[in-house]
Amino acid sequence: MVDWAGVAPSPQSHRFVRIGRSTRDGVHMQKLTASNITDVVLSRFGEAANERFREILTSALRHLHDFVREVRLTPEEWKAGIDFLVAAGHITDDKRNEFILLSDTLGVSALVDLLSHARQPAGATDSSLLGPFYRDGVPEMPNGASIARGTPGETVVVRGLVIGAGGGPVAGAGLDVWQAAPNGLYDLQDESQPDLNMRGKFRTDSSGRFEFRSLKPLSYPVPHDGPAGELLLAQGRHPYRPAHIHFIVTAPGYEALTTALYIAGDPYIDSDAVFGAKDSLTVHYKKSQAGQGDNSRATGEPDFIEFNFNLVPTRRL
Ligand code: BEZ
Ligand code: FE
């Protein structure tokens, strides 16, 4: 958690920032104008102990004021904006966070993620959004098990390697896996699904391999029955995410990797509502074939996805 301790202005802070002209009859307030108000607001900051807090808030305020000036925001538009934020607050609870959804659909979450992974070593697997449907504490399953708990759908096998420093396999890496059921809903959104449906935790074997069974995911809309959905509609945007499977890959000595695999050919692969899909994370279904060349034939085995996750060693300070 960010520690903003010490940022509260001291009770005397206004003494440092009084702006005015002394005259015989007292102090006159400085005349506020649309151009000087930003500096006046910033001059009221007290001796904030936390430099980073000061940097962030100063920049946020400058951008906010510049935005208001640039579009010449009217009082009605300003009120509409405040009402929008209030509505986002009202629909938010411990199961649904409209502010995260807004951050996701406005590309802020993806931007923060891109910036925080900008210096990844070449070959490291790209990260992708965590999303709101992750659940901690899912029990471990043996390699090869299915995460579909009785839900019908088309089976797919997902397998690959976890690779670490020097290109070697990582044995004992953990893979948290979760996805929506073929009806486009996560277990948390759908009471008709068994608890923990479409979730599993797997561990790589001694050669760094993992394998599990799932159901082919489909594209689904992010929750769009609230303010974030209204905003999407007003922008002429759809609320869909391309079909995907989420992963958190962990291993001692490596940075945790939060990512997802996206299914090639999905109609929304190039217009993900939350900007999480990436070329490097796009996978094709492959067919199991018996024999080789002209003798190859379909085996009746389910299609599979093969993907290797390349982890980044933890930085030593
Ligand atoms: C998801 O992948 O499930 C998701 C991600 C961001 C916002 C909403 C849903
Ligand atoms: Fe998802």
Image (cartoon, rainbow, N blue to C red):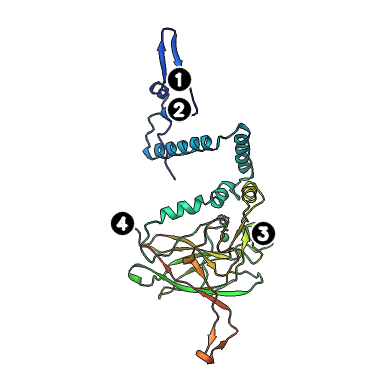
Single out the mark in the foreground, 1 or 4. 1
Q: Quadrant of ligand 1?
A: bottom right
Asked if the beta carbon under badge 2 is closer than 8 A to the nearest atom of ligand 1, the reply is no
Q: Are marks 1 and 4 in contact (CB under 8 Å)?
A: no
Secondary structure under tag 4 reads: loop
Whole-angstrom CA distance, mark 2 to mark 3, is: 53 Å
Q: Are marks 2 and 1 in contact (CB under 8 Å)?
A: yes
Q: Position of residue 84 (x, y in %)?
A: 62, 41
Asked if the beta carbon under badge 4 is closer than 8 A to the nearest atom of ligand 1, the reply is no
Amino acid residing under circle 3: Asp
Q: Earlier in the sequence, mark 2 or mark 1?
A: 1
Q: Is residue 14 above or below residue 276?
A: above
Closest to the observer, 88 or 315: 88
Kindly indicate the quadrant of the structure image that contains residue 89.
top right
What is the number of the mark on residue 316? 4
Secondary structure under tag 2 reads: loop
Q: Earlier in the sequence, mark 1 or mark 4?
A: 1
Q: Earlier in the sequence, mark 2 or mark 4?
A: 2
Q: Position of residue 211 (x, y in %)?
A: 50, 74
Q: Is residue 4 above or below residue 30?
A: below
Camera sees residue 302: yes
